[in-house]
Amino acid sequence: MASIPIPARTAETLPVRPLNILRDLPAVADLIEMCFSSTLDDEGQSYIQQMRRASRDDRFLRWAGQVVDSASLPMTGFVWEENGRIVGNASLVYNRYKHKKLALIANVATHPDFRRRGIGRTLTERAMSHARQKNIDEIWLHVRDDNATAIKIYSDLGFTQHAHRTTYIAKPDSLLPPTSNGLTVTRPQPRDWPLQRAWLEQAHPDELGWYNRWDWNQLAPGLWNWLYRFFIEFDIRQWAVHKENGELLATLSWMSTVRASDALWAAAKPGDGSAGLRYALEAARRELGHHRKLTLEYPADEMVEAIQSAGFSALRTLVWMRATA
């Protein structure tokens, strides 16, 4: 893994300061919205609105002052301020996962009128230094794959690329005609679970599990899982696609959440599951016709034709980068 070099800077000459959650959240929300408006999905819009609501909630601000290192909102980070105006931001979110202390640098944004001055790099360096002071094991960030300038900066700072993941979106469609391809779609059978779990873990690697909080045990067959979901009213729907000989090609899972859009979790046979994945995605769009927008995250450049043929459009591809502290 790469280490993190922190170049020497003359801190006193830079208009950089720590984020002040008592007054900065509205300005930071505006900056993030301006810089990422073209790629913000429903979750991103909800996140920005949450920041704005939090800035008006006195009880939240009192609580936030005590948990700045553990909350999901950007209550730790650094801003670049000129003439009383916040024109740059880098947020920090701390986490723990499997005995590791992790930091996520997020929302690295610079106002368009102030770019090409090294503001984003400087703020990232400050965030990295803050994480090192807390003895973090790993520092993560993600960046759009078409932002070559940012990728180069992060690489120069010691980050290496570990995953490329594409988010797709689609609208449910109860009238979508089924594809006639000789495959059958049913609910997963207990015998499908070992393959389903293995494919899920391959498509959604554990090294990113701390971010998405994947818990595949919730999808497992069995009486206890069924009772758990029944009594807490936790709705899960799953689809499995088999060949005529019973061979499993793909599975797809949907779990009810309070998110702004509904997430699907796909698992397909490597190299031979594309037709099955398309069939499962089409079935989900039909069955979830009364639900909100559907999202699917999958490794970039894998199953692209199958996903798009099922009516999903690529929203963005993110490069996940990591450095050790």
Image: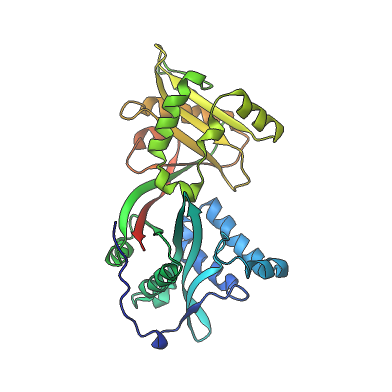
Residue at the extreme top of the image, as rendered: 245
Camera-side residue of 76 and 49: 76
Q: Please provide percent x and percent y for residue 244.
A: 41, 12
Q: Please provide percent x and percent y for residue 202.
A: 38, 36
Quarter of the image with the C terminus is: bottom left
Q: Is residue 289 visible?
A: yes
Q: Residue at x 69, y 34 (%)?
A: 233
Q: Is residue 25 above or below residue 285?
A: below
Q: Please provide percent x and percent y for residue 158.
A: 30, 64
Q: Is residue 293 above or below residue 196?
A: below
Quarter assignment of residue 51: bottom right
Q: Is residue 250 visible?
A: no
Camera-side residue of 227 and 244: 227
Q: How is the image coloured?
A: rainbow
Quarter assignment of residue 108: bottom left
Quarter of the image with the N terminus is: bottom left
Q: Is residue 200 above or below residue 131?
A: above
Q: Please provide percent x and percent y for residue 285.
A: 53, 32
Q: Is residue 308 above or below residue 211?
A: above
Q: Residue at x 45, y 39 (%)?
A: 312
Camera-side residue of 102 and 196: 102
